[in-house]
Image: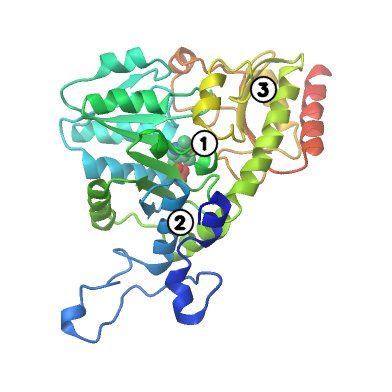
């Protein structure tokens, strides 16, 4: 099995098929597993937090999609991130992180991990010179997100991995925005991939989950020990929902990208738009890097509407197909204003420092018909211009 879509549909299926011929993996609910003999009590499945057959099929499948050897499924993306840090770091350790990170990751680092004596430096990882200068004797992890949320900045995973490895430091890549269909960080030298499977992998806005993928057996064993010890596992039902969703990941991503590319071009030529951020556009300052390290550009984009917060608010409230909502990666199109929603917890000064203006609008482009989406956006612009 080599092709992405074949793997997304079939990897792991034998675990159940050998018993009853299941074509779809069942939701295996038993919390505990009986043994015939005392000497077998620690063999195979023992207790469902430690190992569950439905979750195991999902873990095998997610590993295969990232071209990795091992994966672990968690109850949310944040649970996956927390488990990575508690598995690998301790008091006095230091993380170098991209300064344009998912808000929840920044909150975890600043409000939780710092309390336990873990230090974090934020660096603009678009520039590798800045990374080189940030290393300390106690640096243990470089935390990368690419493309970032919401400004679609990119980090060069291969260059960063080379530098980090020269400093005996591991590289974690949050691959949520691209999904494994469009980017596979392990192929580029990263040590650990983390996902919010809530987004594209599950894809239907009906399950919260997370995952960690690696090729390194030692790292995997450590992470697996902590998955069990900390307990933030994905439930059998949620594992099943993700297994169902992931089968169509490639088809969905192709359509997300087709719609996003066309909407990005439409917005770029619109006189009520100041700027569009989408890595697939030639005008994106890191378009060449995107071409080199990604297999596609994904379904997320942002743009600055002419005017300010007032215009941005009027615009997003006047749409019918785009839902005004946080989150991303589902089949339905979502729209939001980062300054008021996903990034409201960051101070305005700090937002402006990373380039996030009040007039910025973030779009998770869904898989609806392109004409309907563009007509909806056009209606929004008409509402503002008639004000
Ligand atoms: C949503 C998200 C997370 C957090 O995942 P949850 O499943 O919501 O806990 C982490 N990173 C990125 C880039 C995200 O979009």
Find residue 290 and report its horizontal and vertical position in percent: 53, 25
Quarter of the figure with the C terminus: top right
Q: Residue at x 23, y 20 (%)?
A: 135
> On the image, which quarter does residue 173 sit in?
top left
How many residues crowd around disc 1 within 10 Å: few (fewer than 14), some, or many (20 or more)?
Answer: many
Q: Secondary structure at mark 3?
A: helix
- Disc nearer the start of the sequence (2/3): 2
Find residue 192 and report its horizontal and vertical position in percent: 34, 40
Point out which mark residue 177 bears.
1
Point out which mark residue 312 bears.
3
Mark-to-mark CA distance, 1 and 3? 23 Å
> Looking at the image, is mark 1 or mark 2 nearer the viewer?
2
Q: Secondary structure at mark 1?
A: loop
Given residues 354 and 139, the one toward you in this image is 139
> Looking at the image, is mark 1 or mark 3 nearer the viewer?
1
Are the two marked residues, 2 and 3, in contact with CB atoms closer than 8 angstroms?
no
Are the two marked residues, 1 and 2, in contact with CB atoms closer than 8 angstroms?
no
* 257 sits to left or right of 22: right
Are the two marked residues, 1 and 3, in contact with CB atoms closer than 8 angstroms?
no
* 366 sits to left or right of 140: right
Q: Secondary structure at mark 2?
A: helix
Find residue 276 and report its horizontal and vertical position in percent: 64, 19
Q: Residue at x 15, y 34 (%)?
A: 91
Mark-to-mark CA distance, 1 and 2? 19 Å
- Disc nearer the start of the sequence (1/3): 1
Visible in this render: residue 378? Answer: yes
Q: Residue at x 20, y 73 (%)?
A: 42
The CB of the residue at mark 1 lies under 8 Å from ligand 1:
yes
Q: Which residue is mark 2?
A: 61
- Disc nearer the start of the sequence (1/2): 2
> Looking at the image, is mark 2 or mark 3 nearer the viewer?
2
């Amino acid at each position: 099995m080599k092709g992405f879509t074949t793997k997304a549909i079939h990897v792991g299926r034998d675990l159940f098929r050998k018993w009853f011929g299941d074509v779809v993996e069942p939701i295996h609910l038993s919390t505990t597993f009986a043994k015939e003999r005392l000497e077998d009590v620690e063999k195979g499945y023992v207790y469902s937090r430690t190992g569950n057959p439905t979750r195991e099929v999902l873990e095998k499948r997610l590993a295969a999609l990232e071209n990795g050897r091992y994966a672990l499924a968690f109850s949310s993306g944040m649970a996956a991130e927390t488990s990575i840090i508690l598995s690998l770091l301790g008091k006095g350790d230091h993380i170098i992180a991209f300064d344009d990170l998912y808000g929840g990751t920044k909150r975890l680092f600043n409000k939780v991990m710092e309390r336990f004596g873990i230090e974090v430096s934020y660096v603009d990882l678009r520039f590798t010179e800045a990374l080189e200068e940030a290393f300390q004797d106690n640096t243990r992890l470089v935390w990368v997100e690419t493309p970032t949320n919401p400004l679609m900045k990119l980090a060069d995973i291969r260059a960063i991995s080379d530098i980090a490895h020269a400093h005996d430091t591991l590289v974690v890549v949050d691959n949520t925005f691209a999904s494994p269909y469009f980017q596979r960080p392990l192929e580029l030298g990263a040590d650990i991939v983390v996902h919010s499977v809530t987004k594209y992998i599950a894809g239907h806005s009906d399950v919260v989950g997370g995952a960690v993928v690696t090729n390194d057996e030692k790292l995997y064993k450590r992470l697996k020990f902590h998955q069990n010890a900390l307990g933030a596992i994905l439930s059998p039902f949620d594992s099943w929902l993700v297994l169902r969703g992931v089968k169509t990941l490639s088809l969905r991503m192709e359509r997300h990208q087709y719609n996003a590319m066309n909407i990005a071009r439409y917005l770029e030529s619109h006189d009520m738009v100041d700027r569009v951020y989408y890595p697939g556009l030639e005008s994106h300052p890191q378009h060449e890097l995107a071409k080199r390290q990604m297999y596609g550009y994904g379904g997320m984009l942002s743009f600055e509407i002419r005017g300010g917060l007032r215009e941005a608010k009027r615009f997003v409230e006047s749409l019918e197909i785009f839902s005004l909502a946080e989150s991303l990666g589902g089949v339905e199109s979502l729209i939001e204003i980062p300054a008021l929603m996903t990034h409201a917890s960051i101070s305005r000064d700090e937002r402006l420092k990373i380039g996030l203006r009040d007039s910025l609008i973030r779009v998770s482009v869904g898989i609806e018909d392109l004409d309907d989406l563009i007509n909806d956006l056009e209606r929004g612009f008409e509402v503002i211009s008639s004000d």
